[in-house]
Amino acid sequence: MYEWVPTHLKMTALCTEEELRVLQSIFQGAAIEILEHQPTPVIAKARFNPIQYQYKLKLSTSDVVQKQTVYEELVTAMFKDQLAWIDDRSHARKTNHDNAVNSLKLAEEAELMAVKVSQ
C-alpha cells in the first residue's frame, strides 16, 4: 500500500486456489498476473512455518476514489466517534490514545518482517 491514505496496492503473494478466489472477490477488478502455477500444492516455509501454495502472483489495484475523498471520510468518521464519546462517556471509541501506540508497534513489527525486493 502506498501513502498514508492508501488508494492503491501492489502485492506479490503465494496462495492456494481458495486464497486466490478470496483475493479475487476482495479486489474485484484488480490486475492479477500469475507468475507460477503448480497443479498440486507445493510446501514452502514462510516465517519459519510450513505453508502450501499453488500460485505465485502479482496483484495490483487502485481505487477510483480520490485520496481527498477517502481522507475526508476517515476524518469525518473519527470526529463523529469522538463527539459521540464526549456526549456519552460509555461510548466505546474506535480511536483512542492506545491507537497511536498500537499503530507504531504494528509498524515496527511489519518493518522487521518486511523483505525489501528491488524491482
Image (cartoon, helix red, strand yellow):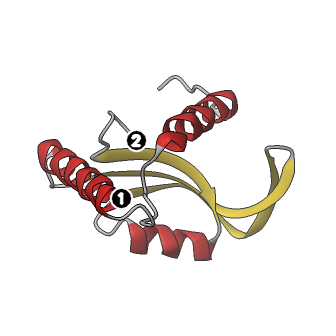
Image position, residue 63 (x, y; %): 22, 54
Q: Is residue 86 left or right of residue 18?
A: left
Q: Residues within 10 Å of mark 2 (few under 14, many from 20)?
A: few
The amino acid type found where label 2 is placed reads: Met
Residue at 23% over, 47% down: 75
Q: Which residue is mark 1?
A: 85
Left or right of 62, for residue 11: right
Location of residue 45 with respect to 40 vertically, above or below: above
Q: Residue at x 58, y 25 (%)?
A: 116
**Which of these two is toward me, 15 or 75?**
75
Asked if the residues shown at circle 2 and circle 1 are in contact, with their CB atoms under 8 angstroms apart, the answer is no
Tell whether 20 sits left or right of 48.
left
Compared with 63, 110 (above or below) is above
First reached walking from the N terminus: tag 2 or tag 1: 2
Kindly identify which residue carries mark 2. Answer: 1
Of 34 and 106, the residue lying toward us: 106
Q: Residues within 10 Å of mark 1 (few under 14, many from 20)?
A: some
Mark 2 → mark 1, Cα distance in angstroms: 31 Å
> Closest to the observer: 6 or 54?
6
Give above or below for 62 relative to 105.
Answer: below
Residue 28 is drawn in which quadrant? bottom left
Amino acid type, label 1: Trp
